[in-house]
Amino acid sequence: MNARLSISGCVLLALLIIPATARAQGARVQLDQLKQLADKAEETVDVTVDSAMLKQSAGFLTGRDNAKLQALIDGLTGIYVKSFKFAVPNAYTDADVESVRKQVAGSPWSRIVGVREKGELTEIYFFREKESTGGLLVLTAEADELTIVNIVGRIDLASLAALGPMIPKLPGAMKKAVPK
Amino acid sequence: MNLEHELRQALKRRTPSSGFDERVLGRIASGATVPVPAPQTRWTRLALPVAASLAFALAGSYYVSQHERQQELAQAEQAARDVVLALQIASEKVSAVQVKVQEISHHERQVEY
């Protein structure tokens, strides 16, 4: 009887935990298939920041100047960036872009911005979790540059856009770009 | 050559001062003793190596903990850099999209008028 109760408890707990985990993973978009583009790119930025790394970084982003940055980070569980700058145009294919777009096609993702002009594509997708935003995907595909930013967690687009000039200039912050 | 001469001088047989043998025999006869240093106990023999080992272990563990702490700090600093870089790129791209959207809406408004 006790064993049966324990098993039922475990099953109930699993039912409660698994959807939450699935939701948290849901806003994560698979970008590993783009790694091969690094061979063709002149400059590559590949950033993978998970929740543990976000917590680790907290100590370095304290202070009044970083309050807004810290407030933005508090709701996040992951940041993933892949950015490639090519020496020649059309070094990547439509299939590369589609491999990302197909993952965010349909619910719970919704496209809030889509601009296509002069062969350039810019899109922003939101991952809706109940009433709040559980993630974001920014995709910009230009002739000689492809950038995908995937943010997992609560994110406010206005705060993110306004953050640019306030971002602290940590030494070497922009030296992550690895020239080929 | 010089060394050989010095050695010869140093090891040359010398006659003892007068009355040397009487003095030695007299001391033996009187039963005079020379204090012999006390033999080292087991504890005193072990103390030095034990203390050295302890000091070495303490210094080692301190070095390891400091090294680990430095590594953690370096990792945290790298994570902070990655976070800033990622948000910088995201912010730039979102701002660029906002500008594009504003331009398009402005253009559409002009066309309407």
Image (cartoon, rainbow, N blue to C red):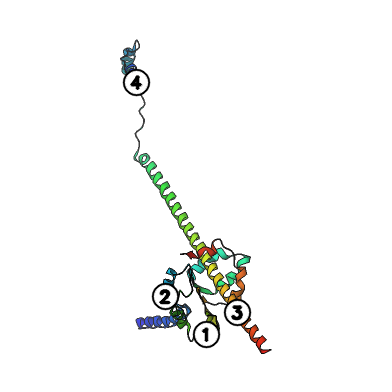
Mark 2, other Cα within 10 Å: few <14 / some 14–19 / many ≥20 = few
Which residue is label 2 attached to? A33
Q: Which residue is outermost to the front?
A: A88
Q: Chain of mark 3?
A: B
Which residue is label 1 attached to? A110
Q: Give x and y (percent) for residue B29.
A: 31, 17
Dots 2 and 3 on the same chain:
no
Figure quadrant of the C terminus of chain A: bottom left
Report the mark closest to the observer, 2 or 4: 2
Which residue is label 3 attached to? B100
Real-space Cα separation, disc 2 to disc 4, in angstroms: 82 Å
Q: Earlier in the sequence, mark 1 or mark 2?
A: 2
Real-space Cα separation, disc 2 to disc 3, in angstroms: 29 Å
Mark 4: amino acid: Leu
Which residue is label 4 attached to? B3
Look at the numbered disc 3 and give the secondary structure of its residue. helix
Look at the numbered disc 1 and give the secondary structure of its residue. strand
Dots 4 and 1 on the same chain:
no
Mark 1: amino acid: Ser
Can I make out residue A149 in this image? no
Report the mark closest to the observer, 1 or 2: 2
Q: Chain of mark 2?
A: A
Left or right of B14? Residue A59 is right
In the rendered image of this protein, does residue B42 appear above or below residue A166? above
The residue under the point 34% across, 40% down is: B42
